[in-house]
Image (tube, grey):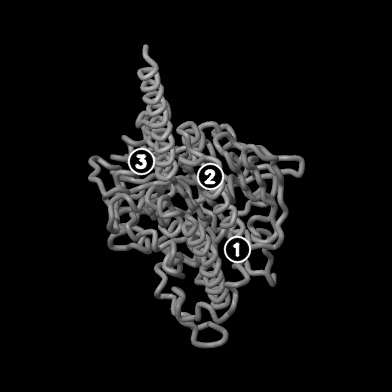
Amino acid sequence: MTPHIRRALAVASALVLSLSLVSHAGAGAVAAAKPQRPNIIFFLVDDMSADLLPYMDTVRGLADDGTTFSNYYVSNSLCCPSRASMFTGQFPHNTGVATNKGSDRGGYTAFAPHESRTYAVSLEQAGYRTGYLGKYINEYPVADAGYHVPPGWDEWHVAAGGGYSEFKYQLTRYVKGETPRLDASDGTYLVDELGRRATDFIARSRERAPGRPFFLQVSPFAPHSRIGAKPGDKEPLFPPARRDRPKTQFPAGEFPHGDCGGPDCNDIDVSTLPAFNEDTADKPSWVRREPLAPALVKQLRKDFRDRIRMVQSVDDMVERVLGTLTEAEKRNTYVVFTSDNGFHLGQHRLVRGKTTAYDHDVRVPLLVKRPTAGRHGDLATGAIAQNVDLFATFLDMAGVDAATRDSRDGRSLLPLIQGRKVQDWRKAALIEHVKPNPAAPGEPDPDAEPLQAGNSQPPSYAAVRTAGELYVEYEGMAEPEYYDTVADPGQESNDPGNARTADLDKALDALARCGKPGAPDCWTAARL
């Protein structure tokens, strides 16, 4: 071989090597700027009723080039069972998580066996960098000596004691590869601290895992009430951030409970809030009660004002987190917002709380902001969706195979989010409730109705909600509860003798047993 030929071959080899390196570097840069799989940000708030959404401009803005679900129902209007359904994609009768307390068929004790099968595990296996912030599962144990980080999470910032107070709390700080610690509150409002840590998570994901998609769940306690409240307390039952407390904010006329014409607020027009203080004579015995006293109405009106103030910090947090996304990330990120359950404040004369099958407790907002690189335009769907669908939805967004994501009780909402036509969708939502035992040992249940006089907790029940009906069967009661929700959206006129109850009884029987040996799977049962 002549020297000229050898030099030519050497130059050619160098050129090939150079082009190869450039090609690989370019591919890496493209991957870092635009991952093929989307990022997912999931905001899960606590006890947010749909009547608070009009006061949240940023959250409502998720509907712009996003998808709004008008018929989204939780499987159980109690924090721990509802969250268990989200994490696993299964109804409470299949998770076995019935209440908030481990001594009463619920809480972390009942949920812990499921930690290896949550969407976090599947997403991490699919290559996602995952982070969890805020409220987790009731009675999750944290001690100064340490804490357990469930499988599937790369970052774990979970509030321990005091989270419901919003000011005096402890917060874990686990970042994979760093030394875990437990931080005491410095007085920062918890929602604000979660917003700061959320933006830090996104920044670390860019720095430590460029090109790797992330899943971030932010779960503030707001607008949940603080626990341990007593009559006469100076601190509000629903504690807003300090900046949102001035009395000049949200004047009386802006509230759904109506205008207040005098300093004592005894002349409130409650007609603007469906079913507020309604005559309950036709309701089941556990609901029937005397009209709300004027002084109590005044207090409930104050509670509602404070709940509106509380969600201002949530709205600020969502704005802060979304504001930290780059344009490239916005083109490839889904943003999901919902609540674990709703809340009532005087509807049907039920003073404060949840756990009922009425819409104010089980029908909560679900808004999904689509990646800006996708379909444009505002979409709305009336398809019946449930929290058991979130497991499959997140896995579908991540490209996990259908066999895995459809192995539970729900189904992916992604086709509906993207505006695709879906055939043979579910016709009914299942709602379950097991009455908690107030005498169960342990810490006070944070979801027991605060400052409530009398027993307003429903008996154990199972209910089915269709596009136009609510049907409830209570344990120990012969008559069901039935409402035509098209003619009576507030569920004020109970009609237990309606001819439709026979068909709904059969549908509910199948749904209440679904997924058990010898019973149909839950998706088949939900399609009636």
Asked if disc 3 and disc 2 are in contact, CB closer than 8 Å, the reply is: no
What's the amino acid at mark 3? Ser
In the rendered image, which residue does mark 3 sit on?
A: 412
Which sits in the foreground, 22 or 322? 22
Between disc 2 and disc 1, whose residue precedes?
A: 2
Mark 1 highlights which residue? 452
Q: Do labels 1 and 3 touch, CB within 8 Å?
A: no
Residue 47, percent across and down? Answer: 52, 57
Q: Residue furthest right?
A: 145
Q: Residues within 10 Å of mark 1 (few under 14, many from 20)?
A: few
Q: Are marks 2 and 1 in contact (CB under 8 Å)?
A: no
Q: Which residue appears farthest toward the front when viewing the image?
A: 3
Amino acid bearing label 2: Ser
- Counting from the top left corner in percent of width and height, residue 338 is at 45, 54
> Between tags 2 and 1, which lies in front?
2
Residue 30 position by quadrant: top left
Residue beneath the point at 50% across and 77% down: 250
The residue pinned by badge 2 equals: 205
Residue 159 numbered mark, or none: none
Q: CA distance from mark 2 to mark 1?
A: 45 Å
Quarter of the picture containing the C terminus is: top left
Relative placement, left or right, of 482 versus 320 is: left
Q: Quadrant of the N terminus?
A: top left
* Left or right: residue 505 compared with residue 118: left
Q: Residue at x 51, y 48 (%)?
A: 217
Distance between mark 1 and mark 3 Cα atoms = 39 Å
**Label 2's element?**
helix
Residue at the bottom extreme, as displayed: 262
Indicate the secondary structure of the residue bearing disc 3.
loop
Horizontal placement of 72 versus 218: left or right? Answer: left
